Image (cartoon, rainbow, N blue to C red):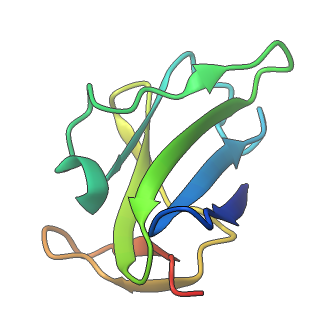
Amino acid sequence: MALTKKFLKSKPVCKVTFKLTQEEAKSADSVQLMGEFNSWDAKAAPMKKLKNGGFTQTVDLEAGKEFRFRYLLDGETWENDWSADKYIPSKSSYDDDSVVSTVA
């Protein structure tokens, strides 16, 4: 898993690219990126499946904030990002949520 951040100079936006390898995605057929930035909507940010079996998605996030997120594999299994900036307890389960920070 990898998080790549690119802060824009022209506006307060951070382009964050989320990536999962095939192994990290547990050979899933589909992965949804869900978090506070898309109201945890499974249809808002489906990740693009790559030829190598991995997945990727780039999202524009407001700079200067932190956002909870998780991956939903095949509509059934939740997975955190191993390279998240930090983890905090979930508001809806006993699991932790991954957190991405756009604080420069």
Query: Where residue 101 sits in the image (x, y, percent)?
Result: 50, 79
Q: Quadrant of the C terminus?
A: bottom right
Question: Residue 49: x and y, percent?
Answer: 65, 19
User: In the picture provided, is 40 more to the left or to the right than 49?
Assistant: left
Residue 41, picture quadrant: top left
Q: Is residue 74 left or right of residue 68?
A: right
Residue at 62% x, 67% y: name it: 9
Give the image quarter of residue 5: bottom right
Tell me the residue at 69%/62% (across/down). Answer: 6
Residue plotted at (19% across, 69% down): 93
From this view, report whether residue 45 is shown above or below residue 5. Answer: above
* Outermost residue toward the right in this view: 52
Task: Residue 66 in the image: state x and y as whole percent.
Answer: 39, 80
**Hey, which quadrant is residue 22 in on the image?**
top right
Location of residue 39 with respect to 31 vertically, above or below = below
Q: Position of residue 100 (x, y in %)?
A: 50, 73
Could you say which is closer to the camera, residue 44 or residue 55?
44
Task: Establish if 95 lies above or below 15.
Answer: below
Residue nearer the viewer, 86 or 101: 101
